[in-house]
Image (cartoon, rainbow, N blue to C red):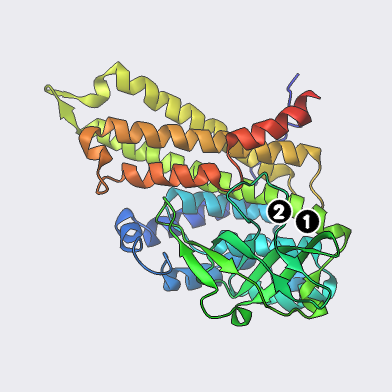
Amino acid sequence: MSVLGNTTLKFSEEQAMILDTAREFCRDKSPVSAVREQLDTELGYDTGTWDEMVSLGWAGIALPEAYGGSGLGISALVPVVESMGRALLSTPLVSTALAAQMILRGGNTEQAERLLPDLASGTTATLALLENADWGDTRIGCIVDANGTLSGSKKYVMDAGTAQLFVVLVEHDGAPALALVRREQLADGAISSHTLIDQTKRAANIDFSGISLADADLICGETVATALGDVLLLGALLTAAEATGSAAACLDTVVEYLKTRKQFGRLIGSYQALKHPTVEMLTAMDSARSLLYHAATIVTDETLGKDAEIACRMAKAQATEALLFAGDRAVQFHGGMGFTYECDAQLYIRRAQWVQQQFGDSLHHRKRLAALLLD
């Protein structure tokens, strides 16, 4: 009997079509040369590529049709994000999708009708959740006082440089709440860039102090805690999708090198000391994909239950370690060249370090899985 309990895994024809389209698009728009061109830019992505993704309907793919989306659910976003990870294509898609899910799951109908159609049509948004680097810290330092004025700051806000809407986790009347802050409300100098080890990504620290909120821009009540729990799991799931795609691309890079590099008159791929770890990379990546699409099968627009939580946490833990192992071996297999920034192996090991921390590392999730599976 499986410890999972629920082992359902369905890869629908719809998902397969999305995956084929997304892989082709990302491969064409984001070859490694294009990725490297964006490393030192302010946004970290090409706005023309983002506009094309919006025109394909990806910004609203997980949102209901009533709010301008495609109504396909969050599972339809998984193959898109996996394809982006494979091509190391970074855009505000994941940040915007998670912000939209927070509003959809936590907000009221008026807030959803007012905000979600814009997000589905390409307006960028992001979540501001962290006061420090610990995803397990439940303390909230951002406060909304009785007059509706915000005080406090958030760290590591993804895609803050381009986001037009910030969904900020705050405390109001002693309980968790969400503040909807528009970019124009931020004071000059409120955003300070934070350099990440993965230079394909962008994040910033933001000071929200002094911002006045209207009642309509504050989400309160019991739905907030539930929505927050769901979105943290969905964030882990989408990060796992990105990591799984990156692990597959890293494996491709390693195999290509093993087939072309010669040492002592032999292709290095003929040595068992390199064959065996390469097979381990493949099995780890395949395991991550299986867990990823199991999770994609059972997550819904409804409140996520125990089975969905187990699936999301298992996918994140496995994908994190699969990419960490693949990135490490890619650097080692390339020898001295692997330690230079010009080697593409560096892109994957840096992505692995970022993935490890985003929405919690494998230890963070396994600690919680122990209670879910063993208690």
In the depicted view, which residue is nearer to us: 147 or 241?
Answer: 147
Q: Mark 1 highlights which residue?
A: 227
Q: Most extreme residue toward the left, as rendered?
A: 265
Relative to 106, 342 lies left or right: left
Which secondary structure, mark 1? helix
Residue 290 visible, this angle? no
* Image-quadrant location for residue 175: bottom right
Classify the position of the C terminus by image quarter: top right
Number of marks in the rendered image: 2
The Cα atoms of the two marked residues, 2 and 1, are separated by 6 Å
Residue beneath the point at 33% across and 40% down: 253
Q: Mark 2 highlights which residue?
A: 231
Classify the position of the N terminus by image quarter: top right
Q: Position of residue 308 (x, y in %)?
A: 75, 41
The kind of residue tagged 1 is Ala
In the depicted view, which residue is nearer to us: 211 or 320?
Answer: 211
The kind of residue tagged 2 is Val
Q: Position of residue 161 (x, y in %)?
A: 50, 70
In the depicted view, which residue is nearer to us: 261 or 228?
Answer: 228
- Marks 2 and 1 close (CB-CB < 8 Å): yes
Relative to 207, 143 lies left or right: right
* Image-quadrant location for residue 312: top right
- Label 1: how many residues lie within 10 Å, few (<14), some (14-19) or many (20+)? many
- Label 2: how many residues lie within 10 Å, few (<14), some (14-19) or many (20+)? many
Q: Most extreme residue toward the right, as rendered?
A: 222
Residue beneath the point at 53% across and 38% down: 320
* Image-quadrant location for residue 122: bottom right
Which secondary structure, mark 2? helix
Residue beneath the point at 69% across and 65% down: 168
Residue 168 visible, this angle? yes
Q: Position of residue 200 (x, y in %)?
A: 41, 57
